[in-house]
Image (cartoon, coloured by chain):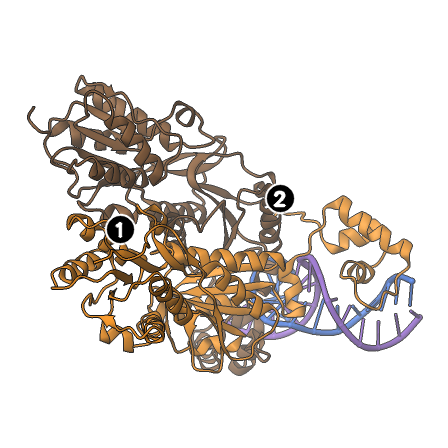
Chain colours: A orange, B brown, C purple, D blue
Amino acid sequence: MARGRVTLADVARHAGLSVTAASLVLNKRPGVRISEEARQRVFAAAEELGYRPNVAARSLRTRKTATIAFVSDVVATTRFAGDMIRGALDAAREREHVLLIAETQGDPEVERQAIEAMLDRQIDGFVYACMYSRRVTLPQAMSARPTVLLNADGDDSVPCVLPDDESAAYQVATALLERGHRRIAVIGRTAEIERNPRRSLAAGARLSGIRRALAAYGARLSPGGQSDGWEPSDGYEATRTLLARRTLPQAVICMNDRLALGAYQAFAEAGLTVPDDISVVSFDDDAIAGWLRPGLTTAALPHEQMGRLAVELLLDWDLKPGKRWVPMPLHERASVAAPRQD
Amino acid sequence: MARGRVTLADVARHAGLSVTAASLVLNKRPGVRISEEARQRVFAAAEELGYRPNVAARSLRTRKTATIAFVSDVVATTRFAGDMIRGALDAAREREHVLLIAETQGDPEVERQAIEAMLDRQIDGFVYACMYSRRVTLPQAMSARPTVLLNADGDDSVPCVLPDDESAAYQVATALLERGHRRIAVIGRTAEIERNPRRSLAAGARLSGIRRALAAYGARLSPGGQSDGWEPSDGYEATRTLLARRTLPQAVICMNDRLALGAYQAFAEAGLTVPDDISVVSFDDDAIAGWLRPGLTTAALPHEQMGRLAVELLLDWDLKPGKRWVPMPLHERASVAAPRQD
DNA sequence: CTGTTAGCGCTTTCAA
DNA sequence: TTGAAAGCGCTAACAG
């Protein structure tokens, strides 16, 4: 530390008062039992000396550090984690809190160490975040402090913040149905992932919202478009096999934007134009969605808001267990048109 | 804090020794002046009780918190910042340090507050990171602690970690020249950005590396391809105007991968095939580079290593001012072929 | 070899 | 309305 950092004692001396008085004034305790004149002297002294309280010292007494631990499985791989962190950071800053972050890479041993390291630093609470929304079991060590799950679903004893994929899927499918599409295929589904909440919560929720919308219009999902992965190459392959079928769909719903990129590539190769020959909608609002030509209509993952909400819950001590669904706004771009008359 | 967290006093009592002795043992001080038997008792007690030192309390005496502040202008917008953070996180974890992060959004007031907040928490040092490499002037408040610049260039009084864009550009251009290309254009240059280190260090360095390579082959840059921005739409427009010229280039060097995406789109529209009709190389190794078809050959920004190096310098007290250049490896994919015979 | 004592900077009874 | 003093958990002189 900068030797000679200004301490409360310095301020008190400068103001000609006791440390106690200075502390009382600066912390604006409710029972304001200090003369107006004295408080002015304290404020003036603090200002003049550039006094800043030492949080570590304070925390020794108060057991509060105004520091939150943000523990995630992976931050780097996609830009989404960045959005969650940004939201969390903003909310924290607004309330004069600060974020300690750690990444576990999904390794339980690294996770344990990270949690211990944060606990050693007396953090006030945990945000436990997942890159892809899925069901998790909370690490034992975390129960020492209030915790909220971010983009993850827990065991009902803990609050969690999740994107509302089901409603988003309903909207996305409805956007197609309203325009008159009926032969609609999904790119990127697979029975396995759809049923395994430990791998993905999104897959199941999205499919179920899509089915609900189709049912409302008396329509059914067109076959084809299966794929295990959700990367662009998976979308490309899935779309190629889809296009090899006898009857082409009028529109496709991609389970995410990366799949949609692959689909665009396959369409272009097949000489199909989006949206004149085929409409496409998707999920996530990855940066790529705005880069494609034509721009991709997609339901945006509200990661920034989710990050913000997670720390707000923590700081407001609104720790009722249960899920908070954050809406996913539909970003309409240019990938949807009415189906060809044929 | 978990009330009843185990303290050093508990351990000492359990071991039947004084707090001092326990402290000495657990910190493995060099002057090992404690009987072997006593130290065993201490270790056993600590283990049994699950003792963990309170870092805040310790820091009050030692003025060390094993905590580093990572202050950046923007983390969320691109996935790159995530890579820098990941590298920093890994290096910190290996040395049992932890990262406090803050984002300033480029707002000096937010920045000031963030720095104060970290200083209040007695952090050991700063990593000051920029999203896009550029020249900065270090905030005054930061001089209170050791600091290293990450992806930024300072005033020579401070160590900084930068990607070696100049060499990368030389390599990238050489990859083209070796295959026989001579009519090479750059997409995304502009005199303004190239000369303004406060906006970008990359632009100038990349252009100069390219020119050096061309000179070695007695070649000159083909005209055209200017653009202010570095987004896909800029690349698309710049490429369209380039293609409207009388003689087409045999290859293009895009100043980043997003521009290259736009270029791909323009080429496809013009009926040009990559790499048969035109080769393309680029910089960054954004995720998009691997998603394009054909895959884009590009010089990778070594963000993870840079983040790692920054905290290593800080923790090793290797704070000699000056620049550390981190090499940018060339990721060869499928966007380069020999030029058409014509 | 080990224990006593004195703080680090702050908050918080308790007394004056 | 104010101040003295204790103590948060730990480390570091200094004795013993």
Question: Which residue in the protein does label 2 denote?
Answer: B109
Measured from the top left, where is residue B113 in percent x and y? 62, 49
Q: Residue B31 vs residue B19: left or right?
A: left
Q: Is residue B292 above or below residue B63?
A: above
Residue at mark 1: chain: A
Residue closer to the observer: B233 or B313: B233
Relative side of A102 to B290, left or right? right
The one of A267 and A217 positioned closer to us in this rendering = A217
Seen from the viewer's position, the closer of residues A324 and B71 is A324
SS at circle 2 = helix
Q: Position of residue A305 (x, y in %)?
A: 50, 61
> Which amino acid, by three-letter code, is at mark 1?
Asp
Badge 1: few (under 14), some or many (20 or more) residues near its Cα, within 10 Å? some
Q: Amino acid at mark 2?
A: Glu
For the residues labelled 2 and 1, the Cα–Cα distance comes to: 49 Å
Q: Which residue is mark 1?
A: A276
The single residue placed furthest to the left in the displayed view is B341
Quadrant of the frame with the C terminus of chain A = bottom left
Name the residue at the front extreme.
A341
Compared to residue A236, the image places residue A166 above or below, namely below
Please, which chain is the residue tagged with disc 2 on? B
Question: Which residue is drawn at the image coordinates 62% and 61% (left, top)?
Answer: A56
Q: Residue at the location (55% across, 53% down)? A: B123
Pinpoint residue A322: horizontal percent, then vertical percent: 50, 79
